[in-house]
Amino acid sequence: MNFYNYYGEGFDVEQLRPRLAKLLNAFRNNEGTDADYLFSSPGRAEILGNHTDHNHGKVLVASISCDIVAAVKKTDDGFVKICSEGYNPIRFSIDDTNIRANENGTSVALARGVTQAVKERGYKVGGFTAYLTSNVFKGAGVSSSAAFEVLVCEIFNDLYLDGALTPVEKAVISQYSENVYFGKPCGLLDQSGIAIGSLSYLDFECPTSPEVSKYDMPKGYALVITNTGGDHASLTSHYAAIRSEMEAVASLFGKKVLREVDYHDFIANISSIKSKVSDRAILRAMHFYEENMRVEKACKALEMGDVKKFLSAVNESGLSSLIRLQNCSVPGEVSQSVVLGIEISRSLIKDGAVRVHGGGFAGSILAIVNENERADYVAEMKKIFGEENVFTAHVRPTGTQKMQ
């Protein structure tokens, strides 16, 4: 098996082999039989487009080399059984897909929701047993939940649907599961980046069929993701507030989302809407419009090979997330590990960019670092945030799929 086809050139294959051996042995020892297939579902790096997807904005997102790997066997008992390393197994019947309030925020809710969404599209699904191992940070902005959702969807897609679902359809199904069953009102960025793969520009003006273009990351630069600490599990209300405040501004113009409101109309009416929504809502709306412009600027820079302008757009995005979007720390909390990580990074990086990564409030930051600086930067960040919390990510060419 040529693992570079899935993980990209430069990936350290020797790190993968023991993971796979341990996973396959666990399946064999517990199930008394060998797994038939291996699936890989990547984490994602949000390069640009912080909190714009849910209001039908534009993003740059990459699938990356950390992933969930699943050893899978098709079964005929009508049950989905998923055993994840370090967690209790989940098991449910494919005929039992009703929403359960007590499962809100759990993996079984995600799997059950994906099952239901696939069935609602008229497909017949069946049972499988899967053993999972993951090096995707949980709750740290690399989208462990989306990687899990898309993985379950692709297992059904491959085993029972003959690959009928497109990457975008898998993303939409997975988003439905997270919104309705898991209880998190996310947009479509995470699931799309994971399902599509590579470095992708996505325009969510039509959210269920986004415009997609693919780009190459600038050569000579690496992605370094640092888990600064904290868990996203208790922060859903803060994420939801970003979306609801943006939509509150849109509603003043008779629209559902900000993408439907003309930017110049918004700017011209700030004085009149100030008494109707919070200042923070206005700032978050400003972030939405300017972030879309930055995505376009970054894409043009990538097309022209202008690395300096691309990095400038990423840095500007990070500053906007801090000041306007205000998702770099939890309101009222003295713990500000994301802000600390960003400011330390700014002092260390001479040629690159840094910004909050993903949903924010806690978790990870993303740095784009010149390869000549990477080793020193990684070493310093490990001293502060821990050896196990800093890693170099490669943009991988594929999204979630079975490994042949």
Image (cartoon, rainbow, N blue to C red):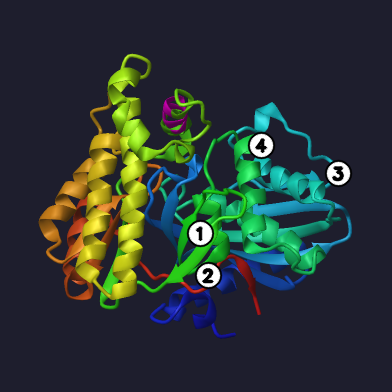
The quadrant holding residue 229 is top left
State which region is magenta.
243-249
State which tag comes first along the sequence, 2 or 3: 2
Answer above or below: position of 55 versus 370: above
Q: Nearer the viewer, residue 12 or 29?
A: 12
Closer to the chain start, of discs 3 and 4, is 3
Q: Nearer the viewer, mark 4 or mark 1?
A: 1
Q: Amino acid at mark 1?
A: Gly
Alpha carbon distance from label 2 to label 3:
33 Å
Q: Which residue, given by chain and number where applicable, does mark 1 sit on? A: 193
Residue 95 - label: 3
Mark 4 vs mark 2: which is more N-terminal? 2
Element at badge 2? helix
What residue sits 47% from the left and 36% below the top? 233
Q: Earlier in the sequence, mark 4 or mark 1?
A: 4
| Residue located beneath label 2 in the image | 19
The residue wearing badge 4 is: 181
Q: Position of residue 175 (x, y in %)?
A: 60, 46
Q: Is residue 217 left or right of residue 351?
A: right
Q: Are marks 3 and 4 in contact (CB under 8 Å)?
A: no
Number of on-image labels: 4
Distance between mark 3 and mark 4 Cα atoms? 16 Å
User: Taking 366 as reference, is 32 left or right?
Assistant: right
Q: Name which quarter of the figure residue 151 lies in.
A: bottom right
Percent of width and height locating residue 377:
18, 64
Name the side, left or right, on which 73 lies relative to 332.
right
Could one spot residue 247 in this view of the protein?
Answer: yes
The secondary element bearing badge 3 is classed as loop
What residue type is disc 4 on? Tyr
Q: Quadrant of the N terminus?
A: bottom right
Location of residue 350 with respect to 13 vertically, above or below: above
Q: Quadrant of residue 217?
A: bottom left
